[in-house]
Image: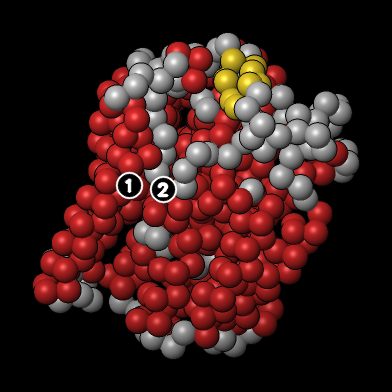
Amino acid sequence: MSVDKFSLLSFTGKMKTLHLSWIAFFITFMVWFNMAPLKGAIVNGVGLTLSEWKTLLIINVALTIPARVVIGALTDKFGPRIVYSTLLAICSIPCFMFALADNFTQLLIARFALGSIGAGFVVGIRMVSEWFPPKELGTAEGVYGGWGNFGSAAAAFSLPTIALLFGGENGWRYAVGLTGLMSLAFSMVYFKNTTDTPKGSTYFRPKNLGGMEVTSVKDFYLLLLMKTPMYLALALLSWKLSPGGVSLLSETVTLLIYLGLAALYLYDAYATYKVNKDIFVTPVAKIHQYQFKQVAVLNILYFATFGSELAVISMLPAFFAETFELSMSTAGLLAGMYAFMNLMSRPGGGLLSDKFGRKKTLLILTAGLALGYLCLSFIDANWPIWLAVLAVMSCSFFVQSGEGAVFAAVPLIKRRLTGQIAGMTGAYGNVGAVVYLTVYSLVDTSTFFLVIASTAVLGFVTLLFMQEPSGTITEVKEDGTVELIHVT
């Protein structure tokens, strides 16, 4: 750990790593959500139907589900410096493809591939955890997540204006392409200016890359159970593209996808068994154990927090425009206030966790989240715009503070698995987004907000089973010596 002072005005040591990491995350979110603020221009320019547009919103978060799991594992194995830099560079390609697309199919393929850039978040979680001590970790992860998440608000604020500055029917293409250039350029900056750990620190790697390690038979079966919703979310997406949805896929192709997902789940379960087969014969020593239920609880909470944020960011500009009869640029500006709260809320959630404990903070924030979305369900054209914006910002505070509190706990479970745990928890955020956006495509906006509030109540109940992180994490260095990592 780097022991220099925590100061946001510093650009040396651990603070330099933090600033470079949140900027990388910021760019990934600008690229990931460069579509929603430009809805009118894209729909009119390419000639999309409303159903096709909503399909693009869902497809935008689909690939991120498996990508976050895979990228989390790769981060643990190869280190965040290489993985983050590579991801930024590669994902600039589908961004350029989207900017050049001329029809729905081309937009769909580019958007599907571009969803993988949403996996960048989990890389920085591992990077930040290597550089900051436990007493500062929640705050540091909150700054990373909150300031990086602001990329979606920056996209909402700036991209419509940039499109207008370029002018013409292709203005949106230049705005989208510009975010791709930013991603490509910063990939080189990040690679040249970061290291995986402070000088002299050990980077602990997982024993195997094929699946997440657990430390008890009960946790093995719980892990398999928690993998299931990720595959079901992809099946739900396939259904949305089938004749039962927008009819982009035939019944035969949809059935083949279902069978492929089932086969992939079985293979995933087998790979997980191969990694963990020893626990069925020899119990893991207590000092090396961790409780997977901690991961499961955080997964469910991130489903409700980040899942709802992704869904709301995707639909809020159009909701404001249609409800209050606003231009898309004005609606995008107002809707961006939801994501704007990330600058303060997510670091605030991490700070509160550092000061008052992970579980207590999460209980309060999750309750506020449920009440916030209940309030949003009552918004209609009779509301003053200022009151609607205030309600959105108030709800946003609890959503994003909750996200900060979740990832204040993630790095305190098992150090060498931090990337994989962050990947799975992050993937649950995307599972939530797919579920919520599918619900949004089927019901009115009021019901959509009520569904989110209901899942937040479920998250509150599961949180009662979580234990406050305490004590130490035991890790073994490559030379066989044991290191105890304090989590309090």
* Vertical placement of residue 270 versus 344, above or below: below
Which numbered marker is on residue 210?
2
Q: Position of residue 486 (x, y in %)?
A: 64, 17
Residue 360 location in percent, x, y? 49, 14
What amino acid type should be assigned to the residue bearing mark 1? Ala
Question: Can residue 266 be seen at all in this image of the molecule?
Answer: yes
**Horizontal side of residue 197 vs 228, given as left or right:** right
Dot 1 corresponds to which residue?
271
Q: Identify the residue at horizontal 47%, vertical 47% (top origin).
A: 209
- Residue visible at 56% across and 76% down? 93
Please rate how many residues cluster around mark 1, counting C-alpha atoms within 10 Å: few if below 14, some from 14 to 19, many from 20. some
Q: Give 122 or 61, whichever is nearer the viewer.
A: 122
- For residue 259, above or below residue 270: below
Residue 317 in the image: state x and y as whole percent. 47, 58
Q: Nearer the viewer, residue 159 or 110?
A: 110
Q: Residue at x 40, y 82 (%)?
A: 106
Residue 421 screen position, x and y as percent: 47, 37
358 in relation to 23, above or below? above
**Label 2 secondary element:** loop
Q: Tell me which residue sits at (30%, 77%) in the image.
A: 49
Q: Secondary structure at mark 1?
A: helix
Q: Quadrant of the N terminus?
A: top right
Residue 267 as seen in the image, left or right of residue 418:
left
Front one among 161 and 242: 242
Nearer-N-terminus badge (1/2) = 2
Q: Are marks 1 and 2 in contact (CB under 8 Å)?
A: yes
Residue 336 visible: no
Q: Quadrant of residue 112?
A: bottom left
